Each structure stands twice: as structure tokens, then as C-alpha cells.
Image (cartoon, grey):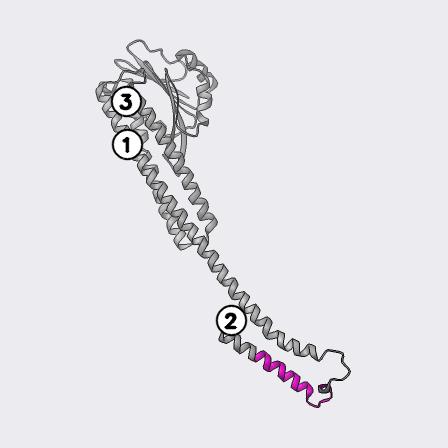
Amino acid sequence: MLRYTLVSSSLKEGQGLKYPVPKKSEFIILFIEQPTVLEIEKVSSDFDIHPEHFERFHNEKRSVRYSLNPFIFVILDFYLEKDIVQNPILFILQKNCLLIAVNNLSETHTKLYQTIISSLKNPKNRKISTVLYEFLRDDIRANYDVLEFMDRQMSALEKRILTKPKDAEQNMGEVMGLRDQFNLMQRRFWESSKIIYAFKTGLVGIPMDRETLKLLDDVYDTVMHQIDIVTSHKERVVELLFLQSTNISNELSQTSVELNVVMKKMTALTIILMIPTLIASMYGMNFRFMPEIYWKYGYVLALGLMIIAAYVGYRLFHKKEWI
């Protein structure tokens, strides 16, 4: 779906492909959700944009700049709904056009677009650079909600690692997932800072007044602060990884101790039973002359000898705390 707002001395809003072509003193904002083939063909033809940009942006795994003239870039957006959502946003910036394309319908971006349009009611904000600043500011501000949510996730995971160390596989999987997420966010923030820096240094062919440049400085500082937060969170993930590794080592050590105890008991039991078995096996030998066979109490004597030998062995191993 394509929505447009033509900005001149007044605002003209609408939907669909029959948007007006901006004149020299005007500019148009196009917001496209899930670009269709017809929308891509029409916009590409009207503003001399290669259709490839629309076809590839939704597969980007990081923020990236495509070109400077026109200024085309993608921001990998993070925002919070029930969970963290990643959504690439395509920006195409020309002197008379700001095009914003998202591949997935999102209530967050719809509200953001409506907020920007509302800000245009103030004549002071009717500059394409100001509109872009408004979008970047609100979008980047939402990163703090995501970072706070991930901080709560780490706190819950840390508590679970300490209280449920036996859930090693699940805990380790979550730690590695957080690590990958922070790596992705850090790359995204760095690329975003480069894109904002391009505005600040005049690489973009869009006029920037001094006030807008100061506002972009504020956005740039915000991104750098968020990079510091992500770096701090990554260090905390390393601590969680070490804590979980320690739990695994402790569990392996405990298993080894338990195995040693079992082996001691089995060894003691084997030796205790071996002596009576040895005595019994002696009287099972097929020698012709065995004096004890003809004794009246020979059987009782042999049985008593076996019991005494077993008891002596038991007492020795019990004293050593093997059994």
C-alpha cells in the first residue's frame, strides 16, 4: 500500500498510485508498505530509481548504504512488540522526494509515519531534511526500549543460571542467542552512525541548515551512546557465558566425584565377596586327599571362615569410608 503527502504551502495526503508530481518548490513523502510490482515500477520510473533496491532491501541483515546520489540506504530497524522485531527500512532521499519502504506491515511504523505527518502541520518543519530527522530520531529513540527489554532478559537468564544450573543446554542456548543478537545490533548501530555522519558532513545532496545539523548531532550522539550500551551488554553476556561454563564444570566435577564413590563401593564389594569365593573355590577342587572333607564340622568351619573373612573385609572398608 502506498501513502503520500505532498508538502508545499499546504499538505495534500492520499493513497494509491495517482500521487502528484512535486514541483520545484514542493516535495513529496511516499510511504510504501509491502511494495507491489506495480508500485515499484511506477515509483522507479517517476523518480529514476533502479527497481533492484526495492527487491533486495528486505533481505538485508544489517544497515547499509547503497548510493549517495540519490542517497539510498537501509536501516535494520529494531522495535518492541510482544518480542523484539527486526525489520529493514528502505530510505530513498532526493531533493523533492523522501521515499520510505517497509516490507512488513507494522503498527509501529504506521504510528511513526502519522507522527511525522502531524509534525508537518507546523510550517517550520516543512523541510525534507527535518522530516528525515524526525523519522531517525523517533526510530533511534525506540532502541532504548529494545535495549531495556534485553537487559531484563539477561537478568532473568542470570537468575536462572544461578538457581537452575542443571538446565545447562537451554541456558547456554539463550546466552549464545543474546550474543548473536547484540552483535547484530552493534553492526546495525555502527552503520546507522555512518549514515547520519554522511548527513553531517554534507555528502548528501540535500541542503541542511545549521539547526538541522545540530539536531543530527544529537541523533548521532544518541546512536553512539547506544553503541556503548550494547558493548556493555556484550561484556555482561561474556560474564553469563563464564558463569554457565563454571556451572557445567562444577556439574562435571560433581559427576566425577559421584562416579568415584560408586567405583569405591563396587571395588570394596568385589573384594569382600572375593575372599569367601576363594575359600569356596578351594573346596571345589578335585583333589583326592582333602582332610577337611572328612571332618565332622568341616562344612561349618568353612562357612564360618567365609563369614568371618567377609565381615573383616567389610569392617576394613567401612573404616576407610568406602562403604
Q: Amino acid at mark 3?
A: Lys
Q: Main secondary structure of the magenta part?
A: helix
Q: Which residue is mark 1?
A: 222
Drawn side of residue 196 relative to residue 267, left or right: left
Residue 147: quarter of image: top left
Disc 3 from disc 2: Cα separation = 76 Å
Report the residue that reaches farthest toward the top: 24
Task: Write down the residue under mark 3.
Answer: 200
Q: Are marks 1 and 3 in contact (CB under 8 Å)?
A: no
Q: Earlier in the sequence, mark 1 or mark 2?
A: 1
Q: Is residue 100 above or below residue 221?
A: above
Q: Residue furthest right?
A: 288
Q: Amino acid at mark 2?
A: Trp
Residue occupying image coordinates x 52% and y 64%? 260
Q: Position of residue 76 (x, y in %)?
A: 39, 29
- Mark 1 and mark 2 residues within 8 Å of each other at the beta carbon: no
Question: Which mark identifies residue 322?
Answer: 2
The residue type indicated by label 1 comes to Thr
Question: Residue 125 versus residue 221: which sits nearer the camera?
Answer: 221
What residue range appears in magenta? 292-311
Q: Secondary structure at mark 3?
A: helix
Above or below: residue 314 compared with residue 246: below
Residue 303 falls inside the magenta stretch: yes
